[in-house]
Amino acid sequence: MPTVALADEAATARLAAALAAGAGAGDFIALRGPLGVGKTAFARAFIEALSGGAEEVPSPTFTLVQTYDTPSGSIWHFDLYRLKEPGELRELGFDEALVQGLALVEWPERIEGLLPADRLDLELSFAPEAETARLARLVGHGAWAERLARGQWT
């Protein structure tokens, strides 16, 4: 499982663009980490990379989900921080996202038992080197484990 040092938000954006280049419909990326670590910044850069910068990407903290149509297909960006119960997912189109699009999910621990077997967990953490530095640990499950092993994320 690769760990990538990210010096600043620009480095986070480069990692997001690299992952976006190899991602497609049916992919599920779980964005893990504490509040303020950069999950939304990663998602924003990922979506901008696939949309060619054509999309404005607000945080879905209050709406819980935002969808984007890109040349590569639809992206569903979930922020489950305010999710009250997993049953709310059906109303948000979660099942549809798993079948038809690419899902980026912040706070996936709120639905741990419902996560797909094939997924990438991107665990962001604060790095001690600098206030802007982060560490990104990529953990592949199912087909994503093989993709990471083959280096298909860069």
Image (cartoon, rainbow, N blue to C red):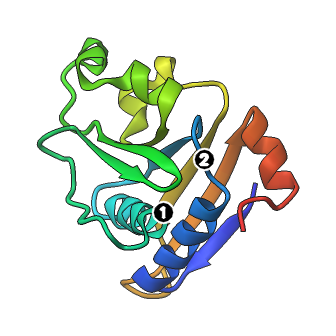
Left or right position of 153 against 76: right
Q: Residues within 10 Å of mark 1 (few under 14, many from 20)?
A: many
Q: Given the current orientation, which residue lies at the most extreme front position?
A: 71
Identify which residue is drawn at 18% across, 47% down: 61
Relative to the observer, which residue lies in front, 16 or 32? 16
Q: Where is residue 143, by image quadrant?
A: top right
Marks 2 & 1, CB-CB < 8 Å contact: no
Identify which residue is drawn at 43% across, 43% down: 74
Rendered image: mark on residue 1? none
User: Which residue is identified by label 1?
Assistant: 50
Q: Amino acid at mark 2?
A: Gly
Relative to the observer, which residue lies in front, 9 or 137? 9
User: Which residue is identified by label 2?
Assistant: 24
Q: Earlier in the sequence, mark 2 or mark 1?
A: 2
Q: Is residue 27 above or below residue 12?
A: above
Q: CA distance from mark 2 to mark 1?
A: 10 Å
Instruction: Tell me the SS state at disc 1.
Output: helix
Identify which residue is drawn at 58% across, 45% down: 121
The percent position of residue 46, horizontal first and vertical second, equals 46, 63
Q: Is residue 108 above or below residue 23?
A: above
Instruction: Tell me the SS state at disc 2.
Output: loop
The percent position of residue 63, horizontal first and vertical second, equals 14, 40
Looking at the rendering, in which quadrant would you find the C terminus? bottom right
Left or right position of 49 against 122: left
Identify which residue is drawn at 47% across, 25% down: 112
Q: Given the current orientation, which residue lies at the most extreme left position?
A: 62
Relative to the observer, which residue lies in front, 89 or 121? 89
Left or right position of 92 against 101: left
Q: Amino acid at mark 1?
A: Leu
The percent position of residue 29, horizontal first and vertical second, equals 53, 44
